[in-house]
Image (cartoon, rainbow, N blue to C red):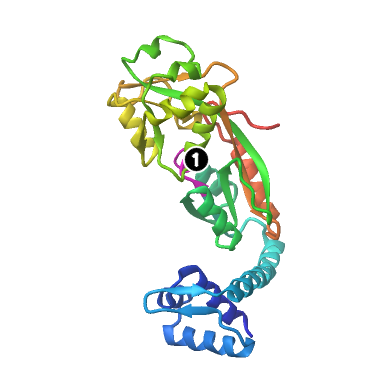
Amino acid sequence: MTLTELRYIVAVARERHFGRAAASCFVSQPTLSVAIKKLEEQLGVTLFERYQHDVRVTAIGEKIIEQARRVLEEADRIKDIASESENALTGQLKLGVIYTVGPYLLPKLIPAIHKAAPELKLVIEENFTHELGELLRQGELDMIIVSTPFTIPTTETRYLYSEPFMVALPMDHPLTRKKSIRLEDLFDETLLLLRTGNCFRDQVLEACSSCMSQQFSQENIQKTLEGSSLETIRQMVAAGTGVTILPATTISEGPDMKGHLEYRPFVKPAPERDVILAWRKSYPRTALVDLVENTVGKIRLRGISIAA
């Protein structure tokens, strides 16, 4: 059994396809297939069920592949430890960020990290929380920036900042006459939400259900429209389709969308979300964890509070 064979079976489990797995490992498909077949014979088990257009991991294969991921991660730690002894801020950092944070944090975070660690190669992945969590667990990412709640037993987390929610309104909407909005003010409004699967959608619905009457939760929540991104929803609001709730960091100062959009804060205590940094407990490069945390702490983002 070799590390190369372990990398092959992890790649097949990830890609669910022998050809794509071979390409990701930079070998031919016959080379990968023969190596995996040899490993299966050596172990006396079947790791994959092979179909014409599908590859499925067997029950015993799941356990072996999970252990293979751990072995490969521990092997990679040797290189990390060696590189960190020379310069802790060199090499590569694979950072994942959720969709509702990335476009607003990354334009400031990337140049700040480059300035602090010019020899560090930063690889960025934007995705949903559950996808980033799985990539982190599999070792495909080194750390991720997500919002709470986030629970994966094999990870550690650090708080980065809290950001309140705000209401986005068409410029001529009656609620623009208010300095701050109560959740009850949205009772009769068409609420624009992100599509199912996005954690910010769930956070907005939780805020509404916990702060409004049961009648709102069950009846008026049906009076919603969905968008694929916060920017799409922002344009829908500017067009007069409805109103929406956005994280404070996504909002620009003053009128937006060429004067067709305005924002109002919620009456305190406003609903908010915590943004955190997560990494595997076995990840050895704590200097990079410190770098990301400290860099985010120095960035000025609209409307957020950062722990001392």
Q: Is residue 14 left or right of residue 51?
A: right
Q: Nearer the viewer, residue 271 or 2?
A: 271
Q: Nearer the viewer, residue 113 or 60?
A: 60
- Dot 1 corresponds to which residue? 101
Q: Nearer the viewer, residue 38 or 143?
A: 38
Numbered disc 1: secondary structure? loop
Query: Can see residue 282?
Result: yes
- Residue 244 location in percent, x, y? 41, 27
Locate the C terminus by quadrant. Answer: top right
Vertically, is 14 above or below 303?
Answer: below
Vertically, is 218 above or below 24?
Answer: above
- Residue 222 location in percent, x, y? 39, 31
Which residue occupies the extreme left position in the image? 239
Could you tell me which residue is drawn at 48 percent across and 28 percent down? 217
Query: Can see residue 119?
Result: no
Magenta residue check for 104: yes
Could you tell me which residue is drawn at 62 percent across and 79 percent down? 3
**What residue span does the magenta drawing correspond to?**
97-107
Which residue occupies the extreme top position in the image? 177
Q: Is residue 137 left or right of residue 31?
A: right
Q: Which residue type does callout 1 highlight?
A: Val
- Residue 205 location in percent, x, y? 49, 32
